[in-house]
Image (cartoon, grey):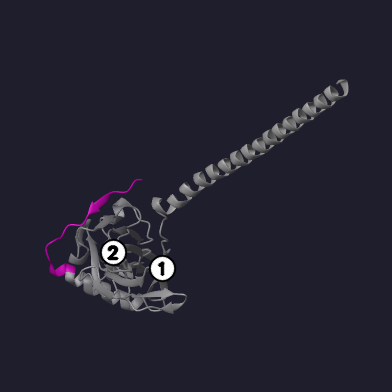
Amino acid sequence: MGHTMKWGTLLPKRPCLWLSQLLVLAGLFHFCSGITPKSVTKRVKETVVLSCDYNTTTEELASLRIYWQKDSKMVLAILLGKVQVWSEYENRTITDINNNPRIVILALRLSDSGTYTCVIQKPDLKGTYKVEHLTSVKLMIRADFPVPTINDLGNPSPNIRRVICSTSGGFPRPYLSWLENGEELNATNTTLSQDPETKLYTISSELDFNMTSNHSFLCLVKYGDLTVSQTFYWQESKPTPSANQHLPWTIIIPVSACGISVIIAVILACLTCRNAARCRRRRRNENMEMERWSVSIKSVEG
């Protein structure tokens, strides 16, 4: 891209450097009044590029003095092509001093928020350095909390379930609450901690509830004007019927089928027997009638 990136290296302190700093502050006092800086918003741990918005040439750079400072603190200085980075930005600030001087700040922190000003001084014909260009950028650093996670911690006692909601890496100081049907619940244990270096917060909260009914819990985290939330659902578990509970039906159904078959067989047998008895009686009656007719005929012939 035609740019040369260089890591800033600390130069030995020299009286002329501190004199230059005084000139920078004097120049800022004169030029900054009435200037509305443009703004840039970034998140913690991201990277930002801040430009001086000043086009120059390689030959001109050799005679320029370039200063970057945040509010009233020095960030970086480039004198005669040599770079000095102040301790707070050391090892995470890259300079690009070709064409359009700019700096790149890596791994942004909350403390990086503020107004950054680039001052470029150029010597006149007498060799006196005067402010040639000045621009300001307001950098705002956000630290958003991620969506909370809810994890199951098991059963501290019979019919009681415990869950924990947690989130980390945000700013400003958060407040965590548990809600059910819009009403705030009493948490079992809530902890809040802040990283002493990054100033970012971590928060977690535990909640106990009765397992014998259905629930819908909302874990709500508020920080400043923003919120993040997560919902946890609990469905009451119903007992599953055991194999023994099915046994009476498995027994009754075959027995009932067999009983019906026996009854039908008995009825058929009875009907068959009745028909057979009628047939026998009919044959017996017929035989008796035949015998009577035979006796009558014999009597007549005699």
Judged from the image, the secondary structure of the residue bearing numbered disc 2 is strand
Left/right placement of residue 297 relative to residue 49 reads right
- Asked if the residue at tag 2 contacts the one at tag 1, i.e. Cβ–Cβ closer than 8 Å, the answer is no
Residue 103 location in percent, x, y? 30, 59
Q: Residue at the location (24% across, 52% down)?
A: 6
- In the image, residue 170 lies at what x, y percent? 32, 68
Q: Amino acid at mark 1?
A: Ser
Q: Nearer the viewer, residue 189 or 98?
A: 189
Q: What residue is pinned by disc 1?
A: 229
15 magenta-colored: yes
* Residue 36 visible, this orientation: no
Residue at (73% x, 29% y) in the render: 283
**Sequence-earlier tag: 1 or 2:** 2
Q: Which residue is mark 2?
A: 153
Choose between 294 and 186: the one closer to the eye. Answer: 294
Distance from the alpha carbon under mark 1 to that under mark 2: 19 Å
Side of 47 where 196 appears, left or right: left
Using the image, tell me which numbered label, if any, was put on residue 13.
Answer: none
Q: Quadrant of the N terminus?
A: top left
Question: From what the image shows, is residue 63 above or below residue 259?
Answer: below
Measured as percent of width and height from the top left, residue 56 is found at 35, 55
Residue, x 41% and y 72% (percent of image)? Answer: 226
Which amino acid is tagged 2? Leu
Q: Is residue 269 above or below residue 3?
A: above
Any magenta on residue 247? no
Tell me how many marks there are: 2
| Chain part drawn in magenta | 1-17
Q: Residue 204's image quarter?
A: bottom left
